[in-house]
Image (cartoon, rainbow, N blue to C red):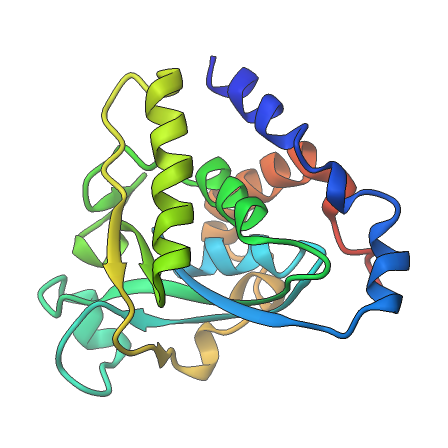
Amino acid sequence: MKNIFLIVLLASFGMFGQNSSIDKAKKQSNFETITLAGGCYWCVEAVYENLIGVKSAVSGYAGGKVANPTYEDVSTGRSGYAEVVQITYDKNVTNLDEIFKVFFTVHDPTTLNRQGADVGTQYRSAIFYKNEAQKKAAQTIIAAMKKAGIYDSPIITTLEPLTKFYKAEDYHQNYYANNKSQPYCQMVIQPKMEKFEKLFKSRLKKKK
């Protein structure tokens, strides 16, 4: 049932079909950012780096209170921070609706403070909104999924105001692209990539 609903959601991408490249050439770029937490940021970053319209996907931390957190601080699970990815996208090519549909496709929004074997508050499912428009868009898609009964368990994705985003250490950036032979990349990230590429095949960036 979940897959059926996702297919229905994806069918609404008509405005970003073949004409998008033509429209893009006619319009001035209009960039926006959204910050998402869906478990290990290596996974989330890898997916969005391959979505058409995304200018950048930067791994980092959000949701805590202590300034300048390190990976070691966040890894304790006591900092309040979540591993997040800040996505900068061109609104002439994609939109927040598509960004969220990808988000709910490639992670499980029903597991509290965990994604698979990654456990801790730093791995919580969360959307860090920077304005009311982003908050409303998130509420709308979550309500639609709940109404459709997509998941057997409740969706526990939190909506949290973005107060500050801290970029993660350099070695965390582009981790999947730089470490594809690593066991974690092959066993955890690769399956997510394959699912994303299958469902969003018409929305993938062309490989160089």
Percent of width and height locating residue 131 = 36, 65
Please identify the quarter of the rendering in which residue 191 is found: top right
Q: Is residue 30 left or right of residue 97?
A: right
Please identify the quarter of the rendering in which residue 46 is found: bottom right
Residue 124 seen in render: no
Residue 144 seen in render: yes
* Most distant residue in the bottom direction: 68
Front one among 173 and 153: 153
Percent of width and height locating residue 171 = 46, 78
Q: Residue at x 64, y 62 (%)?
A: 91
Above or below 55: residue 157: above
Task: Please identify the quadrant where the C terminus is shown.
Answer: bottom right
Percent of width and height locating residue 132 = 34, 59
Q: Residue at x 27, y 75 (%)?
A: 71
* Most distant residue in the left direction: 78
Q: Is residue 44 left or right of residue 60?
A: right
Above or below 86: residue 13: above
